[in-house]
Structures are given as C-alpha cells and as structure tokens.
Image (cartoon, grey):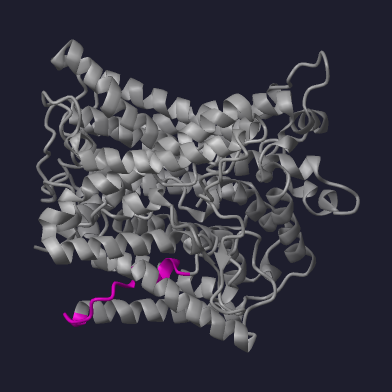
Amino acid sequence: MSENVIAAPRPETQASPFPERGVTFRAVALGLSIVILTNLWVTYAEAVVKSTRLNLAYFQLPLLALFVLLVGFLNPLLKLYRQRLAFSPAELLTVVAIGIVGSVVPGSGITGFFLGIITSPFYFDTPENQWAEFYHPHLSTWMVPTDREALRMFYEGLPPGAQAPWTVWLVPLVWWSSLIAAILVGTACVMVILRKQWVEHEKLVYPLVSIPIELARDADSERLWPALMRSKLFWVAALLAFGLFFWKSLSWFFPAVPDIALIPSGGYFQFTRYSPSLRVRPLQFYTLGFAYFANLEVLFSVWFFFVIHVVEGHIINRMGLQTEQPSDSFTADQEIQSWQCFGALASLVLWRLWVARHHLRDVFLKALNSRYPADDRQEILSYRTSVLGLLLSLLYILFLIHQSGMDLLTALVFLAGTGIIYIGMARIVSETGLVITQAPITAQAFTMDMRGTDVMTGSTLTSMLLSYSLIDYIRGLFAPGLAQAVKLGDLIRKNRRMLVFWVVVGALVGLVASVWLTLYLGYIHGAYNFAFYYKGNPKSVFSSTLSHMRTPGPMAQDRMIFFGIGAALMGLLTFLRYRFAWWSIHPIGLAISASDNSKSLVIPVFFAWACKAILMRVGGVALYRRAMPLFLGLLIGYTFGVVWCFLIDAAWFPGQGHSVHSW
C-alpha cells in the first residue's frame, strides 16, 4: 500500500462517503456565522486585547476551536434532543469549506496590510520623507482615501463629539473589494480546474482537511462523539497540552508559579555565527498535529532541505556572497537563497502544470464544446464556468492594475509571479500539511528584480507599492484555503455546485465584518495603537519602494542566476525522483527551505516525521491509525489552551495580552 493511501483520510475514492445532506441552508448559515465571528474575534484580539495572534495559519486556530465545539458539543446536544436534527458529515464539511477561506481575511491576513497600506501615503507623509513629491501625483481618490483629517481621526481616535467620516472610505473600499472578489473568483476557478489532477491522478493527501474529515465521519451515527474523541489517549493528550497553557496562565497571577516558555524569548539558535537561525519551539503542537497526517517522504523533505539551507547559508555568508540590499521589506534575510528557492518554486509549479497538460487540454476543450468526452459532473463548477470565470477575473484584475498606474508588461510579469506563489503555496500546503509556511520572496520583488526598476515609471512603482495591500505574508492569499475547500467539495454530493458561491460570499462577508470593526475600533482607540502594520511595516515598504524611485537599477543579474540555479536543482531532483525508483528524496522541501518562517516549523515537522516513521516501522498502518487520537489530542488541547489564554487576556489584561502562539 502506498504512503499516499496510508496518509489519506479513508475512503479515498471518487464516490462520496457522505452522500446525505450537503450544502444546506443551515450549514451555509452556520458557516457564514463562523466566518463573521472569526473575523470579529481575530480583529478584536489583535487591535484591543493585543493577545496572541490567532490567524497566522492556513487552518486558522479560531476556526478549528469553533469546529471542535460544533462536533464535540453542539452536534451531540442535537443528537440527544432528536437524532435527525444532527448535522450530517457533508454539512459539517460545508461549514469547514466556507470557514477555511473566509477566516483568511482578518488581521494580518488581508485587513491589516490592506488598511495599513492605503491609509499611509497621506497620513505619514512629511517634508523629510518626500512622499508627497514621489507618490501623491500618482494616487487618486478611488485608490486611497485622501482626506487627511479623516485619516488623522482613524489613526489617533475621534475627538470628543466628532462623528466618524464613513463616507471617505466608500469609493476606495468598493474598488478594492471588487479586486479582491476577482482574485477570489479567479483563484477558485483555478483550484476547480486542478482538482481532478491533484486529487484523482496525483492523489495528494490534503492533510489539513484530514482532521475535519475524520471528526465529521461519525456525525450521523448514534454515537455522541467522533471515534477519535472517544479514545482515552485523545483526552490524556488534550489535557496535557491544555494544562501547559493553564499552568502558564497561573504564572500571570501568582509570581511563585514558574512560567513555561511556550514561545521562548530569544529562542533562536545558530549552528555557527554565519549560518541561518533555527527557532527552538518544541511545544508547537499546532504544526505537529497537522503534519502527522502528511506523507513521510514529504515531511522528511521539509526538514532535510532546511538542513541543506543552513549548510549552504553558512558557506554563502562565510564567502560574503549575500546581497546587501533586499528587494523589499518582506523578503527573507537570506536574499540569495530566497531567490534560489523561488526558482525552485517556479520550477515546481511549471512542472506540475506540464504533467497536467492532458487534463488541462480536456478542461479547455470541454469548456469550448460541451459534447467533448471529459466528465466534469463531479466538479463543484463546470469546466466551462471555471474557464470563463478565470478569464474574466484575469482581465478585470489586469484592467484594475493597469488603471492604478502599472504598465502592461510589468503587470503581466507581476501576475506571473503572483500565479507562481498562489498555485505553488496551494500545492505545497495540500501535499505537506504545513499549517504555516510562505513563499520565499514576494511577487513585487520578483517583478522589480526581473525587469529592473530603471524601466519602471513612478506610476508603475506606486501601483506596485499599493499591491502590498494583499501581500498576506506571501502565503498565497485565498489559494491554499480554496484548494482545501475544493477537496472538501469532492466529498459532498448534494448541492455541491452551490459550494463555491457560498465560499466566495463567506470571504466577502468576512471582509466587510473585519474592515468595519477595524475602522470602528480605529476611531475609538486610534489605529496607531494597533498592530505593526498600522505604524511600522507600511512605512518600511514605502521607504524601500522610494529608494527604487530615487536610485533605479537594472535587472538584478545575481538574483536571476540563483533563480536559475534553484529552478535547475528542482528539475534535477524531480528527474531523479521520476527516473530512479531508489531515489526517495522528495524535492518539495527545496521550494520553502529559505522561507522566513521555515525556521519556526522545522522542529515540529521533524518530530512529526520521526514519530510517524517509528510507528509505521513498528506497527504499520494499524499502529499509525491507533496513534491518531494522541496527535489529535495534542492539537486540540493546544488550540483550546490558546483560546483559554485569550479569554484570560480579554478579561484581566486588555491591551497588555500575552503572546503564547505564533508561527
């Protein structure tokens, strides 16, 4: 039996194991409610409580907590009252599909960077920084709010008796929302087009949704709780993980109680003075729990290539080859290695598209001719709708980017870089189960270094600057979540073609809720008192872009060389894996080894790999499945431990919260 089949949730067949109620009214209503609650929760936590950051993962921690309450508390109550009122497995998966995309929006997802970027040019400009001279001529009221008094009140709070000037936000928010909607629809169409190739032909594991699938499996049985939650091993592990957070919260009230460093301060370790750092976080059960469901070879690849990255980084730094000036403030410290990994990511994406060429041909021929013998009945959108939606979305995105000031050639290069990140991160998350990861460089850095800023006008660079509004920590924005949602749609039979519509609606509803609460809290408390993207990072992005305006440069040939080296290495490793049966090293880890947060995830991934390898060697598939409650318990106990700490912060430490969960 192959490892993919072992790691996948059972059964892994095209026929849905959940043929009963699917995309129902109550499932959609609950999904939308969870999206709204998650967006308000995360926004309030970051802006007011200033507690731990809750939305840095692809499967957001608040979403997992609410889903566990749904399957472990609400659904059992419904069963006790009347069995037929309980949510079916397909309904529960509908809730997850809507939530996993809609919870991308708040805080450091979209809202934080978005509002931070569009409000900065007219609030932070000074005669010294010369933003008015370089940026303002290329900005208009449909792109950014220009009312200085309204911006001052947003950042500093309303004066006594003043009313919030809501109307100044209307025009830019409408246009930006239309761009976000186009990105959302276009990305959803791409994920639908690729579903059959990834799920049926390549049989990706999708570890992130393996957990909700397992928890939803017994929803329609007479048992009150899912099978995994009925295990004593689950409760022991959950109480252990939760107990660490409970003990830590006691230390906030009683100095005699020793603190537990869940996130060690200064917990970075360097093997040598020249090597990249490693973040020591042995208690990161959130990453560990999801990674347990991934393929062994993939987990090995993640930590193995990080070790290679450390060794290579030592050599490069020792030789003094690192570039002095990063392309932008989001690019990782190891500039050359970041470009090498981005080359590997581009090679990965292009190769997987080439492998899927026959399937893609069928998709487009089916879109052109409904009689073409390609079956799209199992898809949550027809191929014709998917192709048309993708083309229209791309045209509208290109139109808006061009209208914002970016020339067409630069816009095309930028969209190509963005596409590599979106598809690449969706692929990596679907294959590795990494709940936190990111691309090694931004699409903006890719575009500026590929073309050279000496051929870009001031309006093009200003438009490039505004595009950082949707940077989302280079995590691929909606693409990874949509890939998981499309996979869940494969397990839903009834009304499945309504799923994409409600997923899109959920994300837009979440955007409205998050932006509204952020603006409201800004006028009440002053946004400058919020997270860093309202006072730190936007200014650094503006400063780095301004340096390109003042001193434009040609194409960065040194970075292009390492981009080519990374692409060639990925090609070589892929060839070896396909050509020789004895070559077992999966190449996927190369694409993210230099990503900024890889230093935080590599230790829990190593533990997941080691534990799973031992279990598989000793007891095979049976022991692997028997150990599932242990890792699920650690994951859920960790999740509710973080929620507990948030509640303590909200009640006793508002504005002075504690960071207990991060990358």
The picture quadrant where one finds residue 165 is top right
Q: Position of residue 402 (x, y in %)?
A: 59, 51
Q: Relative to residue 520, is residue 309 depicted above or below?
A: below
List the single residue furthest toward the front. 256
Lateral position of residue 573 relative to residue 258, left or right: left
Q: Relative to residue 400, is residue 317 depicted above or below?
A: below
The picture quadrant where one finds residue 393 is top left
Lateral position of residue 310 relative to residue 94, left or right: right
Quadrant the N terminus occupies: bottom left
Q: Which residues are magenta?
A: 579-593
The residue depicted at 42 percent of the width and 63 percent of the height is 603
Q: Relative to residue 62, is residue 308 depicted above or below?
A: below
Lateral position of residue 497 relative to residue 569, left or right: left
Q: Position of residue 570 (x, y in %)?
A: 37, 76
Lateral position of residue 386 relative to residue 169, left or right: left
Of the pair 549 and 198, the residue shown nearer to us: 198
Q: Is residue 386 visible?
A: no
